[in-house]
Amino acid sequence: MKKRPILLAALTIAGIFLVFLLFAVLLGKTGSSPDLVSIGEKIGVIEVLGPIMTSEDLIRNIIEFRDNNSVKAVILRIDSPGGSVGPSQEIYNEVVKLQKIKPVVVSMGSVTASGGYYIAAPAKRLFANPGSITGSIGVIMSFPNYEGLMEKVGVSSVVVKSGKFKDIGSASRPFGDDERKLMQALIDDVHSQFVEAVSLGREMPAEKVREISDGRIFSGRQALSVGLIDELGGFQDAVDYTAKLAGLDDDPKLIYPEVEKPGLLERIIKSSLGDIAFEARQYRNVGLQYLWTGI
């Protein structure tokens, strides 16, 4: 009989501990940002940093600011060489939707190229530093070829396929003429989608965009001369312009999206394999790319 109170006390303590542990996990995962619930009109700032390989986080941030009535305008601070075609197009579509509701202004950092420029194009005004790198309007798809190495080590590949194009891009053999034509047609179609997006976003004739959409990069000053940006200036210049555009004070409140803390699995992977292995898993280059490969 004496053991029962001790057991109940132990279970109660364990229950309280589990509740607090669960609360701590949930708070760390989804805790709200005080900026997002603070009173007053604000400018939202969404940072696009590094390769664009996924779209979920950026789209969530865009929707969050779009639905927040206290956010009167949004600045996209972009420092990205671009990335995968699909995510770039998904983000572009959300920027277009946001621009119809609230002003969107772009501030370019060191690099806003290819897919980075793709998502910037529909914004109301684009700022770039004179030495920012931008442009690179084009598509790339890379295929490794290990045929020579396989011959040296005595390894061969046997393929059984349902059609002659099913193993197109295989690393064990070179491209055939028909395959190269097929892939070039694919690249050309996706490239034309890029040209159309820039033409619509910048309100430029498609032919004019096509003249400078051969993958070349521009400095910010060169981009201004060909109409790819609107104004030379840094982040603070973009803030000042956005504040006036939204009818806010000279020193507007800037808010950033909540940074979601990594989950348990992500922390385990990082601690076991290191950040480099984790980033490689996240940002491997696959498929069609709106990507400037110069960095």
Image (cartoon, grey):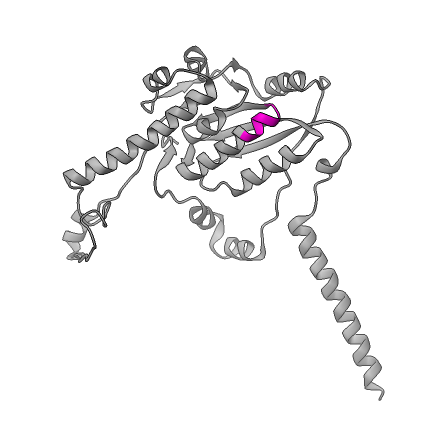
**Image spot of residue 217 (x, y percent):** 37, 22
Magenta segment main secondary structure = helix
Where's the N terminus, which quadrant? bottom right
Q: Quadrant for residue 43, please give it.
A: top right
Q: Nearer the viewer, residue 191 or 4?
A: 191
Instruction: Looking at the picture, tell me which residue is in the foreground, 101 or 276.
Output: 101
Instruction: State which quadrant residue 179 falls in.
Output: top left
- Give how far across and how far down residue 79 sits, in percent: 50, 29
Q: Is residue 227 above or below residue 258?
A: above
Q: In this picture, is 263 found above or below 189?
A: below
Vertical placement of 61 versus 214: above or below? below
Along the line of sight, the residue nearer the viewer: 74 or 157: 74
Task: Name which residue lies at 31% across and 31% down.
Answer: 189
Q: Quadrant of the C terminus?
A: top left
Image point (43%, 44%), residue name: 283
Residue 175: tell me if it is visible: yes
Task: Name the spot of residue 147 as percent of width and height, x first.
Answer: 18, 48
Q: Is residue 282 left or right of residue 147?
A: right
Q: Is residue 132 visible?
A: no
Magenta-colored span:
97-103
Q: Is residue 264 above or below residue 56?
A: below
For the point 61% across and 30% down, which residue is it?
45
